Image (cartoon, rainbow, N blue to C red):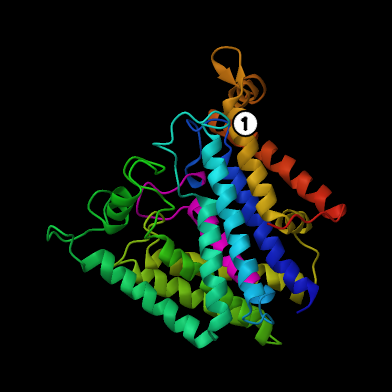
Amino acid sequence: MKKERIASVDILRGITIVAMILVNTPGTWSNVYAPLLHAEWHGLTPTDLIFPFFLFIVGISIAFAYKNKTKTSKTYKKVFIRSLKLIGLGLFLNLFLPYFPFITDMETLRIPGVLQRIGIVFCISAILYLHCNWKVILGLSIATLLLYWGFLGFFPFPDGTLPTFDRAPNNWVNYIDLNILGKHMWKPDYDPEGILSTIPSVITCLFGILIGKVLMSYQNKKEIMLFVIAIGLLISGYIFSYWFPINKTLWSSSFVLVTSGWAVLILSIVYFITDVLNIKFGGIFKYVGTNAITIYFLSSFISKVFYLTKVGENENIHSYLFKNIFAQSFLSPEMSSLLYALVVVLFYMLLGYILFKKKIIIKV
């Protein structure tokens, strides 16, 4: 595959990381535009697309990285080591706030997280890709989405009551997290990166693998093929949502289909612009995408440092910068909050540019 086509994936990966940093670092959570927040429960906002997009792109990367790999102990070792690195980085971020470096209480340490889920999903998806052809992967994906719907919607709880798709405690995703993770969750009643919802998130990655196979297999009119697949996923996902609502926390089957559809659609547009029309587009996003995990980790780590480091008695670095630089402007509170996030984004885009120009690629 030509470098330009791989660049298309890097651009989409970079856009995803930039969007992730944008929604994670507002000036104040009290004033944020609605599209930059997750849906309260059922529903879909632009912010809800970001994490599934990244898992989808992980799948595309697996398709290229492991297409000629043999099923040897060396290959498995690399997969497991990379997965453990990602999980370890995620646990470090959870440990850092508020316990690191003085661990005083582990009873409420959050165990799940974004990087932990990426590590687990990468491991399972890579192994499946090494052992299965595209037909098996597609069949397994469809079967899993249907079984997941059946289990969450119809399998009774131990006391005989039927589950719902509502918030805790009457759905299986929250029930399992509460009984296994207990206090080690993001919220007292649920975790968006919990145990059971990791299963359908693997399917998001597998769909990325299948699209990677499309990019490698079709020589002409790839953008048309991608567009057709995108429309098919979107239509099926929105129809399915009548029975299984679109929900990020549950990572519902309709959520998998719809978010994958949007990912393929945007990829087809980027591919058409960069590869078919040969228009130089999104170079800065490509720079960020080349070191995606590194930049995401640094943004999360530095953000936590800013929140933890006190300035005076009642403020931290984050609140001090926002109040004294951004909140003093003539802009509305929401725009001031967004402006802070945009400045943070520009900083990491510049960092990505510098790393790329110096040919520094930090692989996790």
Q: Is residue 144 magenta?
A: no
Which residues fall within the magenta stretch? 36-62
Image check: 146 left or right of 128? left
Estimate the x, y position of residue 250 in percent, counting from the top left.
36, 57
Nearest the viewer among 199 and 24 is 199
Q: Which residue is mark 1?
A: 305
Q: Is residue 314 visible?
A: yes
Residue 330: quadrant of the picture: top right
Q: Residue at x 67, y 80 (%)?
A: 69
Q: Is residue 152 above or below residue 129?
A: above
Q: Is residue 45 magenta?
A: yes
Q: Residue furthest top?
A: 313
Amino acid identity at mark 1: Val
Image check: 93 left or right of 292? left
Q: Is residue 330 above or below residue 115?
A: above
Q: Residue at x 37, y 79 (%)?
A: 143
Mark 1 nearby-residue class (10 Å; few <14, some 14–19, many ≥20): some
Q: Residue furthest left?
A: 160
Local secondary structure at mark 1: helix
Which image quarter is the N terminus in? bottom right
Q: Residue at x 35, y 40 (%)?
A: 183
Which image quarter is the C terminus in? bottom right
Estimate the x, y position of residue 137 in percent, counting from the top left.
49, 81
Q: Is residue 114 above or below residue 280?
A: above
